[in-house]
Amino acid sequence: MHKGRMEAFSDGVIAILITIMVLEFKVPSEPTPAALCAMAPVFLGYVLSFVFIGIYWNNHHHMLQAVDKVNGGILWANQHLLFWLSLVPFVTAWMGHSGWAPFPVACYGVVLLGAGSAYAILSLLLIRHHGKDSVLAKAVGRSGKEIFSVAAYSSAIALAFVDTRLSGTLYVTVAVVWLVPDRRIERALAEQ
Amino acid sequence: MHKGRMEAFSDGVIAILITIMVLEFKVPSEPTPAALCAMAPVFLGYVLSFVFIGIYWNNHHHMLQAVDKVNGGILWANQHLLFWLSLVPFVTAWMGHSGWAPFPVACYGVVLLGAGSAYAILSLLLIRHHGKDSVLAKAVGRSGKEIFSVAAYSSAIALAFVDTRLSGTLYVTVAVVWLVPDRRIERALAEQ
Amino acid sequence: MHKGRMEAFSDGVIAILITIMVLEFKVPSEPTPAALCAMAPVFLGYVLSFVFIGIYWNNHHHMLQAVDKVNGGILWANQHLLFWLSLVPFVTAWMGHSGWAPFPVACYGVVLLGAGSAYAILSLLLIRHHGKDSVLAKAVGRSGKEIFSVAAYSSAIALAFVDTRLSGTLYVTVAVVWLVPDRRIERALAEQ
Amino acid sequence: MHKGRMEAFSDGVIAILITIMVLEFKVPSEPTPAALCAMAPVFLGYVLSFVFIGIYWNNHHHMLQAVDKVNGGILWANQHLLFWLSLVPFVTAWMGHSGWAPFPVACYGVVLLGAGSAYAILSLLLIRHHGKDSVLAKAVGRSGKEIFSVAAYSSAIALAFVDTRLSGTLYVTVAVVWLVPDRRIERALAEQ
C-alpha cells in the first residue's frame, strides 16, 4: 500500500486544523487598541497551537520520508493522531476565552499528551512494519525528546491547578525543544 | 480519464468534513469540569462520526487502488457519495445538541444509510466499468458487510423512537465491523 | 509553466467551498420533524449549489485535461473564476434563510452569471494560449450550452421579481443541462 | 528534502484562508438591496484580501518553481509566512465590520507588513540555500517591488489615523503593482 494518499490526507486535515483556529478570533465590537488587547489570551493560545501543529506537520513530514510502505493498522494509527490534533482548536479556544483558567489549561495538556502518545504509537507501528534495522528504526530509536515531552505535559496538567503560568511555561518549553525538525532522521538518511 | 484528480478532490472534501465537525464544539461559558461533562453527548457524536468518516476515507482509498480508470458517471456517483457525507456534520451536531433525541438520532441513521447506498452505487459503477473479471469485481463481490450495514441502519432508524441507546449501539456495531479496512481488496490484489 | 499546482489549488478551493456551505445549516433548536421541515428552503438551496459547484469542478477538470501549459494571465483568469464561486455559499445561505425572497434569488443568479462569464473568459484565454487548431479549441469551440446558460441566468434574475419559482426552475434547468460532463472534450480527445 | 509536500501544505493552507474569509459574510436579516449595500465595507475588504492572498499564492508558486531543495529552516520560514497570512481573515473581518475605522485599518497594514517581511525572509533563506549564482538568486535579486511595498504599508499604517481612504488607496496600489506575476523569475528561467 502506498503512503502517498495517507500523506495527502494528513496534510489536508492538518492544514485545515491550523487554519480554522483563526475562526475563534471573534471580531471585536469596538475598533480600539483596548479591544485588541482584550484578545491577548486568545491570541497567545493561537500562537502556541499554531507552533504545535506546525511541529507535528513538520515531524510527520520527516518521519514519513523514511517510510516506504503502510498498512491498515498504520492508517488507523495515523487517524488516531489526527483525532487528537482535531481537538486542539477546541481546547485552544476554551483556554483563550476563559483567560487561561486552570481547568481548560489542564485540558489543553491532556490533548497535547494524547497527540504525543498517538504520535509515539504511529512511530512504533511504522518501525515494526519496516524492521528493527531499517533507516526509520535507527533514526527514531535514540531520543529522550518524547520522554521529556510526556513528563512536561503531565507536570503541566497537574501544575495548572497551582499556577497556570507554570503550565504555560512548560508548553512553551516543549514547543522550543521540538522546533528543530528531527535531525536524527535527516542524519540517519544521510549516513545511509 | 485519470482517477488522480477524483481521488484528490474526494480526499480534500473528506478531510474538510472530518475537520469542520470540530467547529460544533462551542466553547463552554464556564471553565469547569461540569461544563465539559455537559458536552458529552456532542463529543460522543463527534467521535462516532470521526470514525465513520475515517472508515469511508479508508475504504474509498482501498477501493480506488484497485481502479484503473473513471468516467463521467463515476465522477457523479462519487459526488453523490460526497453529498451524503457532507450532511454528516449537520446531523452529528443536531444529534449531539439535542442530547440524542429520537428524531435527530433517526436522521443520523438516514444520512448513514444514504452514504452507504451511495458507496454501493459507486462500487457497482466501478465494477461495471472494469468488467466482471477485474480485480475490483472479485474483491468487492463477496461480502455481507454491506447488507449487514443496511439492515443495521434501517433498524437503528426505527428503534430510535423506542430507545435511542439501541440505535447508538447499532451505529457503534457497524463502525466496529467496518473498522478493519477492506481485507478483501488487499487479498485480491495479493492473489493477482 | 505547469498546470499541476493550478489544478491542485483550484481543487482545494472548490472542495472547501462545496463543504463549508454545510456550515449554514444551523442546528434546529427543536429535535422535531417540523424543525427539519422549516429548513427546506435552506436545504434546497444547498442541493442546488452543491450540484452547481460539482458541475464547475467536473468541467474544470475536463477542460484542464486538454490543457498543456498555463501562463500568468490564465492563473488570474482562474483566480477570477474562484472569486465568483467563493460567493456561492453566501448567496446560497441568504437565498435559503430569506425563504427564497426575490432580491436574494436575483443575487444568486448574478453570482452564477459571474461564475459563468469567468469560466468563459478562462476557456477563451486557454484557447488563445494553445492555438486555434488545438484539441482544446476544437473541443470547446462548438456549443450553445454557454449561450443558453447566460440567457437563462439573465432571465432568472429578471423573473425573480415576478415569481421566484420561475427563477428556481431556470436554475434547475441549467444544472440539468450541464450535469452531463463535457462530452465535446472527451470526443475531441478521442478523435485525436 | 523534497519541496513537494511543503508546496502541497502551503497550497492547502492558502486555499483554506482565501475561502474561509467568505464565512465573515453574515447573512443579512433583510432580503433587500439596502441590506446588501450595508455590507459594502465588508465586501470591499474581502475583495482586497482575496486579491492579496491570490498574489501571495501566485508569487509563492513562481518562486518555488525556481527552487530545487528545502531544509528545516526553510520549512519554518514558510510556516512563518503562513502564520501572517492566517491573520488576514481576522483583520479583514475587523476592518470590514468596523466600517474601515482607523485602528483596524492600521492593523490590516501591520499584518500585510508581517506577511511581506515573512516572504522576504523566505526568499533570502531560499537564495542562501541555492547559492548566489542560482537561477533563483538572479531572478529575485533585482527588484524594487519589495521596498516599495514595505514603504507603502508603513505609510498606510500611519495614514490610517489621518484618513483611512489614504490607507485604502495605498493597499490597492500595492495590490496592482504585484498583480503581474513575477516576470523576473519567468525571464530568468527562460534565459537559462
Image (cartoon, coloured by chain):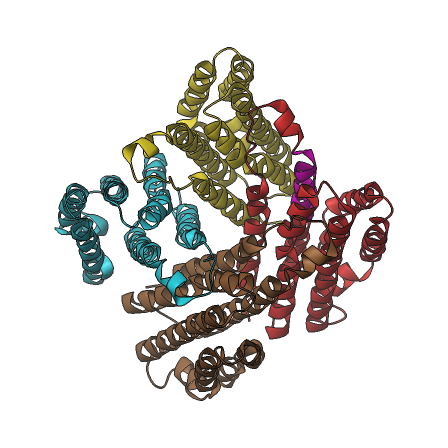
Chain colours: A red, B brown, C cyan, D yellow
Q: Is residue A130 above or below residue C13?
A: below
Q: Is residue C89 left or right of residue A64?
A: left
- Residue C192: x and y in percent read 20, 59
The answer to which image quadrant residue B8 occupies is bottom left
Q: Is residue B48 visible?
A: yes
**Magenta region, main secondary structure:** helix
In the foreground, A167 or C62: A167
Residue at x 43% of width, y 63% of height = B87
Q: Which residues are magenta?
A: A39-52
- Residue C183: x and y in percent read 20, 61
- Residue D157: x and y in percent read 55, 17
The N terminus of chain A is located in which quarter? Answer: bottom right
Q: How many marks?
A: 0
The answer to if A121 sits in the magenta stretch is no
The answer to which image quadrant residue D174 occupies is top left
Q: Is residue A73 left or right of residue A186?
A: left
Q: Is residue A122 above or below residue A21?
A: below
In the foreground, B63 or C173: C173
Q: Is residue D65 left or right of residue A176?
A: left
In the foreground, A16 or C173: C173
- Residue B107: x and y in percent read 44, 70
The C terminus of chain A is located in which quarter? Answer: bottom right
Q: Is residue D73 visible?
A: no
Residue at x 61% of width, y 56% of height = A86
The answer to if A48 sits in the magenta stretch is yes
In the image, farthest residue toward the top: D162
